[in-house]
């Protein structure tokens, strides 16, 4: 099989390529990525010389480059996106261009090249926000209700993918998954930001009261879910993918990290809240469990500890990405370095 992976130099995309090449060494992978601030070829050192792996440096909005990349492809796995909510609040336009227009360019090309499967990676954030202290969870029938420019742009891309399935018969599948964590996550996201700040002896910015809830999923469990959907999923279907945490607040997450790293709780710094901050996410993943036999296998506490160990062992990786433009972003977002 020949796969086109878009955004394969990012956090989840690179974990997916490493996972896939280990489990399906006979398959060929083309990675199309335009290496934004979030793309990093260091993540893929292990496979860069593998003859079954090819990197194309290009933008998913460019029809010619996409056409080139799509040649001979059986399966598209579409990760490429602007993915950070805070950046979408600072500058929404990049999100609309990449996440909506870029997805449409890929869909057109996939249709033209008659790919056998277009798998779209989406997010639980398209469903909006749940109330604190209640049992509700998102499921495949939950209405779309996105609240940030990021989630609105992802909702737009989901709708386009479904429209290409209904209108043109493009064989699609979609996964909407919860917050991933693990190696190679860019340290603008909460968990790697907390870990690397602590390693630098800096405080951890916690938005507002810190009582926001996310559903945490170890990145390899996400890769396993995509694998199953590609191999056994029903064309046209959407599957929700979530983790093993039970309503854990951001404050509790930081306290766990501080405890593992042997630092006091005075490292928590409450800062100005995110605009339009969604209170709670929780995912009901019973459909993918019942239909495809998937469930998360990586326990949060154990893999949080392993993730912390990874950042400790890979100081050069995160120090390199925390320089230059990152500093400008941090200053703009948090008002200090
Ligand atoms: P990321 O920001 O780490 O990586 C995104 C990658 O896409 C980068 O390599 C970047 O260079 C590339 N890219 C961006 N714009 C591009 C363009 N115009 N053309 C080509 N490449 C481009 O993101 P991530 O956290 O790995 O997320 C991957 C996907 O998973 C996204 O679609 C995101 O919406 C979705 N998702 C992420 C999470 C999460 O917790 N991180 C959860 C649910 C869904
Ligand atoms: O739910 C899936 C989504 O998870 C993905 O679609 C997104 O691509 C991914 O970035 C993530 O979005 P979140 O906004 O939930 O993740 P983030 O790591 O930015 O924030 C997690 C929580 O931590 C959220 O409640 C905001 C809070 N936070 C975040 C940062 C960066 C803080 O309190 N302080 C911070 O400095």
Image (cartoon, rainbow, N blue to C red):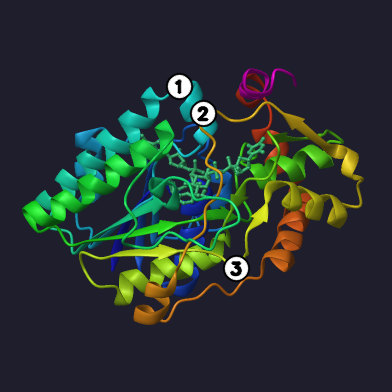
Q: Earlier in the sequence, mark 3 or mark 2?
A: 2
The N terminus: image quadrant: bottom left
Residue named by callout 2? 87
Between the C-alphas of marks 1 and 2, the distance is: 6 Å
Residue 255 position within the rendered picture, expressed as x and y whole percent measured from the top left: 81, 50
Helix, strand or loop at disc 3? loop
Q: Which of 129/60 is in front?
A: 129
306 relative to 101 in the view: left or right: right
The CB of the residue at mark 2 lies under 8 Å from ligand 1: no
Is 308 placed above or below 19 here?
Answer: above
Of labels 3 and 2, the one closer to you: 3
Q: Earlier in the sequence, mark 3 or mark 1?
A: 1
Residue named by callout 3? 244
Helix, strand or loop at disc 1? loop
Residue lying at 87% horizontally and 36% vertically, measured from the top left? 201
User: What's drawn in magenta, residue-wise?
Assistant: 329-337
Dot 1 crowding, Cα within 10 Å, few <14, some 14–19, many 20+:
few
The CB of the residue at mark 3 lies under 8 Å from ligand 1: no
Between the C-alphas of marks 3 and 2, the distance is: 28 Å
Residue 332 shows in the view: yes
Ligand 1 placement by image quarter: top left
Residue lying at 7% horizontally and 52% vertically, measured from the top left? 167
Residue lying at 75% horizontally and 21% vertically, measured from the top left? 337
As for residue 335 lying within the magenta part, the answer is: yes
Residue named by callout 1? 91
Between the C-alphas of marks 3 and 1, the distance is: 33 Å
Dot 3 crowding, Cα within 10 Å, few <14, some 14–19, many 20+:
some
Q: Dividing the picture into quarters, in which one does residue 330 lie?
A: top right
Of labels 3 and 1, the one closer to you: 3
Helix, strand or loop at disc 2? helix
């Amino acid at each position: 099989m020949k796969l086109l992976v878009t955004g394969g130099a990012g956090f989840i995309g690179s974990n997916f390529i490493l996972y896939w090449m280990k489990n399906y060494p006979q398959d060929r992978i083309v990675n199309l990525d335009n290496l934004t601030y979030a793309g990093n070829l260091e993540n893929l050192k292990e496979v860069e010389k593998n003859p079954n792996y090819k990197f194309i440096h290009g933008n998913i909005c460019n029809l010619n480059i996409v056409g080139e990349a799509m040649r001979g492809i059986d399966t598209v796995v579409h990760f490429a996106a602007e993915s950070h909510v805070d950046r979408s609040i600072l500058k929404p336009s990049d999100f609309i261009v990449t996440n909506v227009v870029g997805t449409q360019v890929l869909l057109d090309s996939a249709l033209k090249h008659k790919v056998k499967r277009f798998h779209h990676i989406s997010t639980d954030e398209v469903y909006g926000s749940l109330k604190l202290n209640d049992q509700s969870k998102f499921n495949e029938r939950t209405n779309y209700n996105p609240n940030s420019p990021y989630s609105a742009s992802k909702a737009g891309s989901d709708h386009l993918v479904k429209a290409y399935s209904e209108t043109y018969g493009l064989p699609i599948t979609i996964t909407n998954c919860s917050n991933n964590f693990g190696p190679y996550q860019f340290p603008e996201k909460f968990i790697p930001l907390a870990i690397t700040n602590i390693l630098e002896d800096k405080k951890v910015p916690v938005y507002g009261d810190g009582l926001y809830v996310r559903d945490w999923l170890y990145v390899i469990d996400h890769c396993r879910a995509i694998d199953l959907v590609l191999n056994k999923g029903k064309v046209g279907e959407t599957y929700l993918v979530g983790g093993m945490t039970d309503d854990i607040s951001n404050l509790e997450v930081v306290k766990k990290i501080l405890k593992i790293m042997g630092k006091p709780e005075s490292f928590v710094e409450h800062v100005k809240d995110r605009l339009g901050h969604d209170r709670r996410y929780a995912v009901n993943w019973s459909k993918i469990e019942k239909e495809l036999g998937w469930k998360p296998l990586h326990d949060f506490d154990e893999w949080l500890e392993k993730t912390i160990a990874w950042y400790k062992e890979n100081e050069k990786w995160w120090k390199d990405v925390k320089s230059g433009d990152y500093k400008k972003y941090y200053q703009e977002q948090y008002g200090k370095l």
